[in-house]
Image: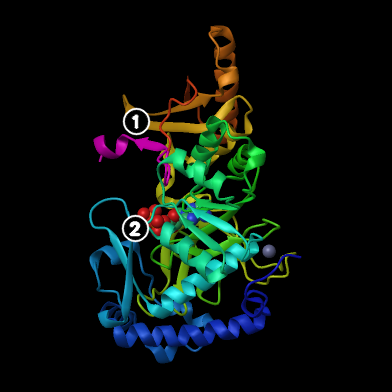
Amino acid sequence: MGKIWNETKECMSRDDMRRLQSERLKKVVERVYYNCEPYRKRMQEAGVSPADIKSLDDIVKLPFTSKKDLRDYYPFGLLSSPMSEIVRIQGSSGTTGKPIVAGYTRRDIEIWGEVGARCLTAYGLGKNDIVQVSYGYGLFTGGLGAHGAVETLGGTVLPMSAGNTEKQILMMHDLGVTALACTPSYALYLAEGLAASGLPREEFKLRVGAFGAEPWTEQMRRDIENKLGIKAYDIYGLTEIMGPGVGYECEFQHGTHICEDHFYPEIVDPVTSEPVAPGEKGELVFTTLTKEGMPLIRFRTRDLTRLIYDKCECGRTAVRMDKIMGRCDDMMIIRGVNVFPSQVEAVICETEEFEPHFFITVDRVNNSDTMEIKVEVKEQYYTDDIRGMLKLRESLAHKLHSVLGIHPDVKLVEPRSLERSQGKAKRVLDKRKFTND
Ligand code: ADP
Ligand code: ZN
C-alpha cells in the first residue's frame, strides 16, 4: 500500500466525513451570507437563511453559482474576505469577454498546497523527488498550483513553466527529474521532443506524470505512458474552486479521489438542475467548505462525470469521480446526435496506425451538419500507396461511425502536421457558432 499524506482526512469514515462536511457547510454559508452581498441577496430571494442549513441534506435549498456569476461580479464581487486578507489572485482564460478571477487568503494558499501534497503522495512521490512543473506559470492555476504542491510535499520543484521544449528535455535529463507535471497534450509534445533529442531513455530518471487541466481518455493515458515510459496520473482542479489538487488518482487509478473535506461534490442533471440518482452521470457541482477568499456555494462546473462512493483498494474513503468525459460546452450536436471530442480521441488512440493528434471541424453546409476529422498518421504507416491509405481511412471512418453514430469525413494528414499544444489543446472548431447564431 502506498503512503497517504493526510490519513485522518483521506481515510475518514463516511459518517465522520459527513459530520465534518455538515459543520463546515454551516460555517461557509454563514461566511458568504454575512460577508458577500450577492450571496446574501441570492439567498434572501430563495427564502433561505443560514439558520435553515442544519446539515448537508439542506444543501439542496441553496441556490447555484454559475460561471456567469463570476463574470457578472468580476473582479472582486464574490470575495468573502477584505482585500487586506487576499494574498494572491489567479485567473482562468474563460471563453469570451471578461476573464474569471479568484482571490486567495494565506490560509487558502496553505490548504491548496496541502491538497496538492495529497495528490503527489498518492502518485508515489516524496521528499527525494524532483518535479518538473511544465504547466504555464501566471494567472493560470496549473503552474503555481503544482509548484505549491511540491513545496508542501518537501520535494524539489523545477519551475520550468510551458514552452521551449528542447530546454525542457535537457533539464529533465541533466537534473535527473523524476516527475513531470503538465497538461496531457504537452506531455505528448514533450514525448516527441524526448524521442527527437536522441538522448537515450535510460539516462532519464522520469517515472511519474501528474497530468490534468483538460479531459484525457484512458486510451490517451496508455499512449503517453508508452511514449514516455512512465506511470501517468490524473490531477483535477479548477480556478473557481482552487486549482489543481481538488482531486487526484491513487495507485489503483479507479477514478479520481476528491478532497471532499474541502470541496463537497454533487452531481446534477445539466438541463433540469435536479440531483441525479447516486452513481448516475451528470454535471459536477462543488461547494467549497473551507475557502476564505472566494468561497463558492454549489458552483456549476459544466464538467460531466459520476461519483463512486465504494471504498477504494488504496484504503482511502474519499469519494471518487470517473474520468471527466468532457464539459457540457464541449458537446457537439451533429445531425441531432450528441458527440464528444473524448469519443473521437478514444477511437484514434486505440488504433495503432495513428498519432493521438486530431482536429475536428464542424460546419453547416446546405442546412446539413458536417464533421471533418483530420488525423495524423504515424510515420511508419504514412505511404504513397493510395490504395493502402484509402483502406486505412475507411477502416477509421467505420470505427468512428460505430462509436459516434454519425459518418464523419475523415482526412489523413502527414505526421507532425497538426499544431501541438503547450497548454490545453484546442481540438475543435465549430464554424456553426459563428455563421448560424
Ligand atoms: P478554463 O479552462 O475554464 O479557462 P481552468 O484553468 O480553471 O479554466 O480549468 C478548469 C477546467 O479544466 C475544469 O473545469 C475541467 O473542465 C478541466 N480540467 C481540469 N483538470 C481536468 C482533468 N484532470 N480532467 C479533465 N478535465 C480537467
Ligand atoms: Zn484509491
**Where the N terminus falls, by quadrant?**
bottom right
**Position of residue 425 measured from the top left corner of the image (x, y, whole percent):** 43, 42
Q: Nearer the viewer, residue 278 or 17?
A: 17
**Position of residue 148 measured from the top left corner of the image (x, y, whole percent):** 47, 67
In the rendered image, which residue does mark 1 sit on?
363
The reply, left or right, for residue 250 in relation to residue 38 is right
Q: Quadrant of residue 130?
A: bottom right
Q: Which three-letter amino acid code belongs to the residue tagged 1?
A: Asp
Secondary structure at numbered mark 2: loop
Task: Write down the region rendered in magenta.
Answer: 421-437
In the image, is residue 402 above or below residue 7? above
Q: Which three-letter amino acid code belongs to the residue tagged 2?
A: Gly
In the image, is residue 245 above or below residue 356? below
Secondary structure at numbered mark 1: strand
Q: Residue at x 68, y 80 (%)?
A: 13
**Position of residue 297 measured from the top left corner of the image (x, y, whole percent):** 40, 74
Residue 359 within the segment the image draws in magenta: no
Of callouts 1 and 2, the N-terminal one: 2
Q: Quadrant of residue 66?
A: bottom left
In the image, is residue 321 above or below residue 374? below
In the rendered image, which residue does mark 2 sit on?
138
Q: How many marks?
A: 2
Is the CB atom of the residue marked by disc 1 within 8 angstroms of ligand 1's nearest atom?
Answer: no
Q: Residue at x 50, y 46 (%)?
A: 171
Q: Nearer the viewer, residue 329 or 20?
A: 20
